[in-house]
């Protein structure tokens, strides 16, 4: 980030950077009306998407936690599976649905509703908002779901026992207790959707420009690194200011709402009208499963696009859409026979192996230090470790690119592995740290009291207890590495990974082989996650006494 800030105050030459201080880049960003409108549009789209994501995510998380007790865990697994399916696959799925030959246009044409394909469905802000909500909805659900786990359902029963209606309980109790989780989900979704640049490239067209895409262009064909760096720094500050304003407005509205509610309660006539209106409203809506119905609709919204991609990958037709002309595996064979695809697949595998090993070597000691050691800067380190998760991907990508260029490091395999290590290490720290917090340190102390040295305790006690988490973290990191495109696209150079290669293909053409590649990526990601889930489950069921007895000969 420091190197990126340095580039933002340098002068841009003809396809080069002159290391001469200037504020002209920032002046251009703030003085050019085109850039100002673009920033406002981007922030507006981010706010719209974040609001929709919080509303929909809260409905699903609330239903999973408190309503669908039996089916909740299964729905949560499906939501997680769609999240880890593949970033590009989920974007591509909506191209297969909204395109000229996509599912929606073909159905409308066949039933005679329209005479020609609806072009606005795919290219424009409608497609951008729809796709962004689809891509990041699982993030919102999981974040809010985690926050709702700390709420005791008995508080709802207590509220009802004290005479509050369902609506008042929801407004006075549920929303207030869930407010921290809702705010975190809003902030995360706002950051992710505002800075996304791949979605506008694929489904936005010329009419769907966003700041992230313009920043990406400055580090690509535009070759104006200083201007792109200045726009990146302004974007980070603009997002922080926008979130601060939203937080302040929310606090003001909450205080105003409480004062208004108190004033209304002092007016008996108004209170009586409110009671009558509330009773009528309660009779109309009482018993209708709103959250359950919305959850079912949103679950279909998450699964249907992936199913469409799978079906289209088996279509015999030479176009990646309808009409369906029979089942074939031809496109899978064509993909596997392409030497270019095999080359990028080998690159992805090597990058994945290097970055997973490096992230484990960095993340595991870091997790031990954060849990087992107390030092003065532990809070700062803990916050910094998770910085790559909170900073927008486009900013991380351009920051790494400028750093490698500044250090004269050629782009390619090694920079990709370094970038992935930066992205993966926080996940290793998170998984291992969570496991260490669950482990009872008295077990290790008992082993040392019995005469075992530190190395033997680690080998026979600590490592077996951590092993399922380490394997699960490695598989999770492998899935993330194989799927990353937002950061990798900036540092890949002439050594693209599979997602970067697919992104290039999707920019140039729209063929049935892309469906096959998308399904292969989907299957690979889900397989890794399934193995990870099995490992975690076995780790939880392993009995501690067996580990201790086997390690010490008891």
Image (tube, helix red, strand yellow):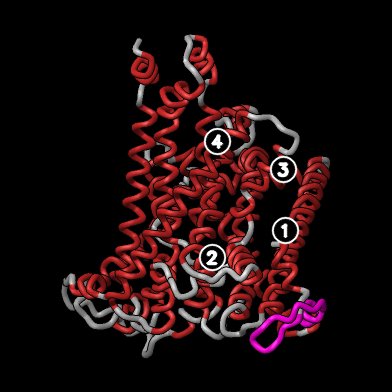
What residue is pinned by disc 2? 487
Q: Position of residue 204 (x, y in %)?
A: 52, 79
Task: Calculate the distance from the C-alpha at mark 4 to the C-alpha at mark 1.
Answer: 29 Å
Which quadrant of the figure contains the C terminus?
A: top left
Label 1 packing within 10 angstroms: few (<14), some (14-19), many (20+): some
What residue is pinned by disc 4? 433
What label does residue 468 carry, if any? none
Q: Position of residue 361 (x, y in %)?
A: 50, 43
The front one of 90 and 457 is 457
What residue is pinned by disc 3? 380
Instruction: Give the label, 2 or 1, closer to the camera.
Output: 2
Instruction: Give the label, 1 or 3, closer to the camera.
Output: 3
Task: Calculate the distance from the C-alpha at mark 4 to the C-alpha at mark 2.
Answer: 25 Å
Q: What stretch is highlighted in magenta?
A: 11-28
Could you tell me which residue is drawn at 34 percent across and 60 percent down?
A: 522
Q: Which of marks 4 and 3 is nearer the N terminus?
A: 3
């Amino acid at each position: 980030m420091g190197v990126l800030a340095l580039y933002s105050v340098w002068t841009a030459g003809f396809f080069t950077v002159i290391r001469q201080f200037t504020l002209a880049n920032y002046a251009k960003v703030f003085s050019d009306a085109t850039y100002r409108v673009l920033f406002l549009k981007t922030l507006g789209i981010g706010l719209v998407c974040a609001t929709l994501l919080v509303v929909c995510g809260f409905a699903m998380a609330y239903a999973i936690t408190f309503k669908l007790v039996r089916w909740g865990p299964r729905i949560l697994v499906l939501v997680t599976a769609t999240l880890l399916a593949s970033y590009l696959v989920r974007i591509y799925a909506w191209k297969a649905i909204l395109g000229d030959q996509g599912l929606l246009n073909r159905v409308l044409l066949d039933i005679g509703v329209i005479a020609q394909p609806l072009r606005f469905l795919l290219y424009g802000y409608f497609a951008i908002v729809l796709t962004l909500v689809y891509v990041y909805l699982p993030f919102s659900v999981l974040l809010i779901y985690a926050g709702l786990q700390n709420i005791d359902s008995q508080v709802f029963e207590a509220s009802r026992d004290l005479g509050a209606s369902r609506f008042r309980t929801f407004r006075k109790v549920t929303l207030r207790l869930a407010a921290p989780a809702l705010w975190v989900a809003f902030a995360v979704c706002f950051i992710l959707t505002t800075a996304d640049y791949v979605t506008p490239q694929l489904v936005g067209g010329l009419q769907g420009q966003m700041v992230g895409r313009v920043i990406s262009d400055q580090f690509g064909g535009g070759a104006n690194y200083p201007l792109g760096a200045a726009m990146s720094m302004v974007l980070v500050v603009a997002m922080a200011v926008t979130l601060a304003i939203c937080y302040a407005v929310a606090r003001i509205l909450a205080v105003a709402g409480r004062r208004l509610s108190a004033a209304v309660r002092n007016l008996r006539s108004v209170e009586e009208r409110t009671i009558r209106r509330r009773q009528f409203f309660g009779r109309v809506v009482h018993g209708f499963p709103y959250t359950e119905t919305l959850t079912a609709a949103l679950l279909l919204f998450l699964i249907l696009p992936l199913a469409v991609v799978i079906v289209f990958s088996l279509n015999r037709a030479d176009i990646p859409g309808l009409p369906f002309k029979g089942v074939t595996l031809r496109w899978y064979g064509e993909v596997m026979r392409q030497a270019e695809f095999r080359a990028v697949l080998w690159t992805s595998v090597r990058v994945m192996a290097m970055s997973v090993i490096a992230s484990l070597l960095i993340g595991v000691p870091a997790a031990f230090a954060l849990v087992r050691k107390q030092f003065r800067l532990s809070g700062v380190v803990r916050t910094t470790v998770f910085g790559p998760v909170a900073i927008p991907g486009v900013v991380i990508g351009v920051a790494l690119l400028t750093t490698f260029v500044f250090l004269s490091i050629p782009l390619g395999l090694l920079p990709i592995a370094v970038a992935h290590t930066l992205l993966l290490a926080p996940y290793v720290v998170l998984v291992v740290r969570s496991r260490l917090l669950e482990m009872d340190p008295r077990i290790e102390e008992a082993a040392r009291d019995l005469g075992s040295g530190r190395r033997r305790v680690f080998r026979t006690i600590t490592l077996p207890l951590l092993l399922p988490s380490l394997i699960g973290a490695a598989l999770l990191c492998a899935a993330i590495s194989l799927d990353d495109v937002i950061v990798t696209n900036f540092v890949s150079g002439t050594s693209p990974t599979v997602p970067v290669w697919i992104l290039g293909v999707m920019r140039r053409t729209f063929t049935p082989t892309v469906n096959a590649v998308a399904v292969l990526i989907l299957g690979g990601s889900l397989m890794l996650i399934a193995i990870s889930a099995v490992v975690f489950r076995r780790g939880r069921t392993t009995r501690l006494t067996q580990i201790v007895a086997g390690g010490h000969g008891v």
